Image (cartoon, grey):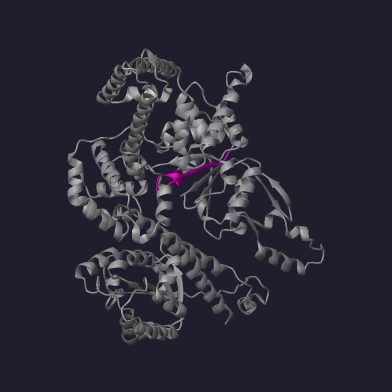
Amino acid sequence: MQVDLAHLRQGFADVGYICDQSTVLTVYLALKLEKPLLIEGAPGVGKTEMGKALAKVLKTELIRLQCYEGLDETRALYEWNYQRQLLRIQIDRHRQEKQLEEEDLFSLSYLLERPLLKAIRSPEKKVLLIDEVDKCDPEFEAFLFEVLSDFQISIPELGTLHAENIPVVVLTSNNERELSDGLKRRCLYLYFNFPDVARESQIIRSRVPEVGEHFADEIARVIAHIRSQEELRKKPSIAETLDWARALVALGKKRIDGALVNDTLNLLLKNRQDQLLFHRQIGKKGIEELLQQPANLGEDCKCY
Amino acid sequence: MLLTAPPERFFEENMAAFAALLRAEGLVLGTAELLDALQALHHVDITDRAAFKTALRATLVKNQRDLEIFDQSFERYFIPQAAQAQQLREVTRQREQQANKLKEAADELSFKGEPLPLSTEEMLLYTSLPDEQRRNLRRFVQETEAAEKERRPLRPLLETVVKGQLRYWHSRKEQVAKGDGPGGAGGSSMAAGDTDKRLRESDIRKLRQADLPAAKALIDRLSRQLVRKLVYRRQRGASRGALDFRRTVRANMRFGGEPFLLKYKRKRRSKLPLLFIGDLSASMKRYSSFVLQFIYGLQAAVSNLEIFSFADTLEYLTPALKDQAGLEQILERVVLQGESWGGGTNIGVALKELSESYGELLTPRTIVIIASDTRTVQLDRALPALQRLKERVRQVIWLNPLPSEQWPRYRSVQAFAELVEMWPCNTIAQLEEAVAGRLFATTVFLDQEAGKR
């Protein structure tokens, strides 16, 4: 796959994924070195979105493997289609001409491909998104490490299947537990922080163009202020910012005020404790005060 | 070392030295990462400092906490040429300044035209003293010189006094440095991970007021993590299990008995009824509210969570918790009302009332958790009440905030510990271990038993 830095940068801009230079460069290096890209960061900073955007930029299919505790090889790699094998035996039982061989039953047509195998066997280069890898068990992580090292899979009945095209692998982690050194060693690393006000405003304008520049800035400032509350159980994600922006547009609003934030708080803070914390620490008055201050949109985004 | 490397290997040597520097700063990185970095540099314009840095960071750093170390090390190691010249000028200037200072000190502290035998450090210290101190010391030397003229050999004495004075000022300086150094500002500059570790391991009752929000957030995080684990464990358990022949045969009757659909045994997994009684007397208030917050966070993983508080009397908090917003508000309200808070603790009365008024909550499956330091009035009445409670429920667990080495000192601790299981639990780490490691190990035990029946 021929990629160059300028096209990649333009590609991300075209699909509406706003990110800084160093992020684009890291993705570029991952593509060039054919290494998996591990992205860490708080929930809702755009890690998964990066995988999706990359698939769009490279104009290829996205294969997604969502990790969870208890995820095993039959869900991630392959499974034999037991029912189909049984049917075949049934059909063949009454045929006289040819004896059914064991190899007939364990051929590729009876193999149910799960995301990892699908990505490896695909004739084109695909983007494989392994989402929330920190949620899977350490045993599965070790297995993943093996697959990502050699890009080959051994199936006892079939032998070893090699990757025809090494897929572009993006792994995301919410940092809930430390990943093993082995897995990390295989990957290039990227850390996402929440975007600063200027970048978030840019994201809002790119995704919800109906909001004007000034309104987008106001929204981004309010969000940044809410996120600055360290005690929040869950800080509003970028997706929630966008939902909020859309909701405000739908309500026909052009400016933000304290009462409006209060009335639409459910879109940003989705548990009672966080809402109470907001009322206690910021409240209507805090928002009004914030908006009266001159805008300080901050320096360039500090994404790693 | 760098300058002696052959020119064609200069770049690689330099990179290896940088990797060694990062390792010395605590980063885990091997040759594989270094090779990746060198390979990555083939694809970027290495005269672009930002791109060069990004390429190294993406390949050499593998977690968030190391990013800052990397950034600092990079800035220190790869210094732009202009800055390098500036630094060189600065070093030369400092050296010259120091030489001047030494000369000044030698001139001023000389005895009969001969400098006193002071070390470089002592001389520099002398030049850094406030003017007044320097004047005093100089005057002392001059006066001694005058006295010597009266033929008394004073030089050894003078040396001792001057050195002693300088030592004194040195120790004063160090004390001042310590006073406004790490002790004061350490908290804010400490990395989040370190704060967590410190909070986990410090005695809950001795946490500073300023630490409380962070400690609460930590407890909240831990309990949510635990719930997630327990719920996952349950989901996973549901899908695995031995083949259920009876259900498989029944489900496949429609296929003429061919086993197309395989049915597996589901493990019976029952949630655990928990009843928590927290001692909310003055000395236990903070401790119990922490434990309570942790246990309250486990609601999703237990079937029934009943919460009581006691000091002199028992109070049933569950209904208030169901009606209202959150635990914090309830605790605030209860504190304000002061119904049972801050009174003399009477465990006996509280347990008796629990058995009499809330008997329906005490089932043979219930696990009762008591958080208390065991200090109570009327210990003799409390013991039989605890015995009766123990007979009605599956298990009584006592979380004791006193460190276990203090236990032998208290008669009440020994008396209660003879009756029920008592776990030391005075830090957040111990609380986590008690609930995640020991209490829910019991749940798994219960589940397996249920499966066998």
For the residue pair A303 and A21, the one nearer the viewer reads as A303
Q: Which quadrant does the N terminus of chain B fall into?
A: top right
Compared with A129, B257 (above or below) is below
Name which quarter of the figure residue B20 lies in.
Answer: top right
Nearest the eye: A69 or B279 = B279
The answer to whether residue A8 shows anywhere in this view is no
Q: Is residue A276 left or right of residue B160?
A: left
Residue B385 point in image, percent of width and height = 37, 85
Question: At x 50% / y 41%, what residue is drawn?
Answer: A55
Residue at the image position 57 percent from the left and 28 percent from the top = B17
Magenta span:
A35-49
Residue B61 image offset from top left, x and y in percent: 51, 38
Outermost residue on the top side: it is: B113
Residue A11 image offset from top left, x and y in percent: 45, 34
Q: Which quadrant would the C terminus of chain B be assigned to in this image?
A: bottom right
- Specify whether residue B236 is painted magenta: no
Looking at the picture, tell me which residue is in the foreground, B87 or B170.
B170
